[in-house]
Image: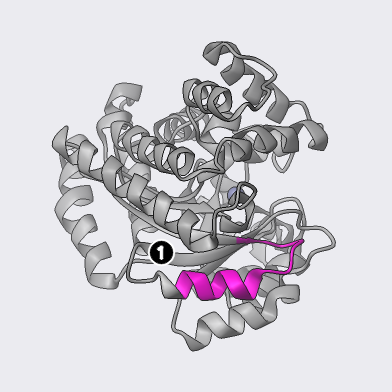
């Protein structure tokens, strides 16, 4: 294998399925928006603020980790704030060589200043539209779909699921639930998932990140999740390369795992990138995808995640292509659109890189 450079990884097309809108803001934008709405920040210098976010997420303290989102969500309570954050998200991903992204956020967390759920979704979509148009004008083509997230400790999942379906032809491609896993099993939201299935809609569930197999089992067998947000704890059902019933089911059905290596190391779900189960799961040919989760808190990007994996596992362009095509195959947009991106953009670019 020839060593691959970070600059070449940036240029290579990439697909991203698991990225939180409130976890990917530019520090300078947080400073400006906080100033406009009178929100107090721990640091007002953008560079130092960026470092503060990574350090707080690294600290191992749940309190400090949650505080990071209190600051980003606080500056995303107006149409202007949401619009700007979404626009910059599209621009930043496009500059990083991401050609397809599904960005998730929880509309119910953006109502503190009086916006309605519909106003939140409209503002985010207008921002993504402007960002993708601006990126295209710079010669960078990116498509962005959104996933609407319901918070698992709250009781609004049915309402958010209905909101997602109402906006399905205006950029919302799926639904998700997020938040503390322990004590809040996905079956609490069964009504919402059954509704989405009756509507022929797509959804993923944060499961098997901090919490183990029962959460993954419920997400798939009770709720009918199309994909697993993280799902990394599926390794608990693999002993010396031998798969248990649940792990077999996940692999046999090609259920995509939205793995987020750096984020998992920060939360303690993996000890290091080199020890992350992604190596084993790839070798066992699970439908593995690589994701950023929270770019700001993890100080990461798609290219950085790919570079870290390449370094830790010796992966080259063929592995990076496999991961990218896995993600595209697992996207929530229609089959023909997925195929077009794979055949027209991903394969030709990697064919050149593979020489
Ligand atoms: Zn997540």
Percent across and percent down for residue 293 are: 55, 43
Task: Give the residue displayed 69% in from the left and 37% down from the top.
Answer: 70
Whether residue 100 is visible to the viewer of this picture, yes or no, is no
Q: Secondary structure beneath disc 1?
A: strand
Q: Could you say where residue 331 lies in the image, as x and y percent from the top left?
A: 38, 62
The reply, left or right, for residue 203 in relation to residue 180 is left
Residue 97 visible in the current orientation: yes
The N terminus, quarter of image: top left
Task: Tell me where the magenta segment starts and ends, as one range.
Answer: 150-165
Q: Which residue is mark 1?
A: 172
Q: Is residue 195 left or right of residue 14?
A: right
Given residues 174 and 206, the one toward you in this image is: 174
Q: Quadrant of the C terminus?
A: top left
What residue is drawn where x is 64% and y is 25%? 53
Q: Which percent across, then down, holds residue 228?
A: 58, 62
Residue at position x 62%, y 26% in the image = 38
Find residue 188 and report its image quarter: bottom right
């Amino acid at each position: 294998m020839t060593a691959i450079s970070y600059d070449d990884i940036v240029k290579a097309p990439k697909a991203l399925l698991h990225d939180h809108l409130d976890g990917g803001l530019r520090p300078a934008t947080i400073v400006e928006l906080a100033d406009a709405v009178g929100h107090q920040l721990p640091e007002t210098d953008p560079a130092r603020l960026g470092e503060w976010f990574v350090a707080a997420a690294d600290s191992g303290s749940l309190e400090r980790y949650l505080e990071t989102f209190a600051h980003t969500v606080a500056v995303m309570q107006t149409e202007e704030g949401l619009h700007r954050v979404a626009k910059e998200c599209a621009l930043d991903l496009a500059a990083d060589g991401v050609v397809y992204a599904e960005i998730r956020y929880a509309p119910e967390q953006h109502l503190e200043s009086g916006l309605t759920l519909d106003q939140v979704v409209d503002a985010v979509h207008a921002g993504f539209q402007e960002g993708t148009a601006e990126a295209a004008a710079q010669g960078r083509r990116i498509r962005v779909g959104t996933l609407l997230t319901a918070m698992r400790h709250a009781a609004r999942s049915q309402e958010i699921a209905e909101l997602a379906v109402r906006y399905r032809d205006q950029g919302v491609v799926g639904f998700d639930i997020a938040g503390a896993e322990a004590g809040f099993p996905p079956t609490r939201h069964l009504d919402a998932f059954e509704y989405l299935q009756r509507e022929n809609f797509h959804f993923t569930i944060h499961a098997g990140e901090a919490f183990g197999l029962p959460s993954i089992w419920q997400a798939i067998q009770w709720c009918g999740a199309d994909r697993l947000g993280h799902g990394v704890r599926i390794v608990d059902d693999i002993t010396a390369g031998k798969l248990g019933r649940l792990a077999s089911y996940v692999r046999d059905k090609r259920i995509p795992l939205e793995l987020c290596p750096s984020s998992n190391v920060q939360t303690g779900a993996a000890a290091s990138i080199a020890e992350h189960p992604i190596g084993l799961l790839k070798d066992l040919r699970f439908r593995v995808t690589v994701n950023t989760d929270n770019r700001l808190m993890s100080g990461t990007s798609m290219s950085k995640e790919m570079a870290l994996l390449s370094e830790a596992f010796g992966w080259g362009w063929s592995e990076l292509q496999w991961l990218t095509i896995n993600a595209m195959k697992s996207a929530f947009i229609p089959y023909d659109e997925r195929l077009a991106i794979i055949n027209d953009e991903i394969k030709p670019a990697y064919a050149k890189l593979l020489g």
